[in-house]
Amino acid sequence: MRPSERGHKMLSFPAARVILLLAWIYPSDSLYFHIGETEKKCFIEEIPDETMVIGKYRTQLWDKQTGSFLPSTPGLGMHVEIKDPDTKIILSRQYGSDGRFTFTSHTPGEHQICLHSNSTKMALFAGGKLRVHLDIQVGEHTNNYPEIAAKDKLTELQLRVRQLLDQVEQIQKEQNYQRYREERFRMTSESTNQRVLWWSIAQTVILIVTGIWQMKHLKSFFEAKKLV
């Protein structure tokens, strides 16, 4: 994503901004975490619509004898469940100790990715810890460009152009998603402002009605005491 230039010539500010944006949008998120026998871990990914996501994971089981994590046996596996921003389940599937899952978002927003162990052999787990290495790739990072180049017989220049086109397309999706978020935020702000306005009007009406009632009550009191 960084064009090579001879010498020490500095990039112009707009070009630098584009390069930083290309490097920032949708990197590959790789991490690991620990879970217990029935524990469930969930992650939130903000994804534009019509964007492919690929997740890869592998598991390691804690071994008390060696005091380290070892590759899991086939009896241990993971259950993957993915929900869209409307909490609709778009993927729910059982995998082995190592697995790969793929889905395409159809609604922009926060997608929930949950994993939990689905061990069928309790003796293997024995209340120990399971380490899960998770790698999530979003957007054009899901493309296997060496495979694409070999399949379509692309030259290095053609492959580079293909990568840039995919990056530009992903930037457009991100911009559309940011506009979508801005529109939702604006609608929420307008709704909140309207509620605050109507609440202020209601408070004013209550104060006026209370004042009129108090004036009438005091007048009746003074008349009863023959003070007026």
Image: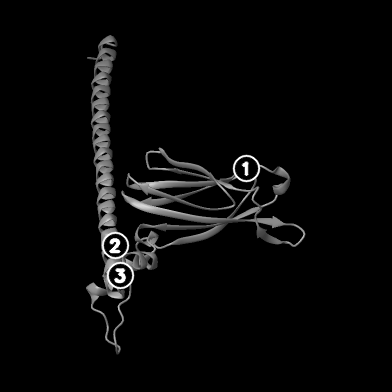
> Dot 3: what SS?
loop
Where 166 sits versus 105, above or below? below
Q: CA distance from mark 1 to mark 3?
A: 48 Å
- Residue position for label 1: 38
Q: At 26% across and 12% down in the image, what residue appears? A: 220
User: What is the x, y in percent for residue 66?
Assistant: 75, 62
Q: Which mark is residue 218?
A: none
* Among numbered discs 1 and 2, the one appearing first in the sequence: 1
The quarter of the displayed image where residue 33 is located: bottom right
Q: Foreground residue, 21 or 155?
A: 155
In the rendered image, the quadrant that contains the C terminus is: top left
Q: Determine crowd level at label 2: few under 14, some 14-19, many 20+ residues with C-alpha closer than 10 A.
A: some
Residue with the mark numbered 3: 154
Label drawn at residue 166? 2
Say what secondary structure mark 2 lies in: helix
Q: CA distance from mark 1 to mark 2?
A: 40 Å
Type of amino acid under label 2: Asp
* Foreground: disc 3 or disc 2: 3
Closest to the camera, between mark 1 and mark 2, is: 2
Horizontal relation, residue 117 to residue 46: left or right: right
Measured Cα–Cα span from mark 3 to mark 2: 15 Å
Please, what is the three-letter code of the amino acid marked with disc 1?
A: Thr
> Closer to the camera, 155 or 182?
155
The residue that appears at 28% across and 41% down in the rendered structure is 188
Compared with 127, 3 (above or below) is below
Position of residue 2 measured from the top left corner of the image (x, y, whole percent): 32, 76
Image quadrant in which you'd find residue 10: bottom left
Q: Tag 3: residue type?
A: Leu
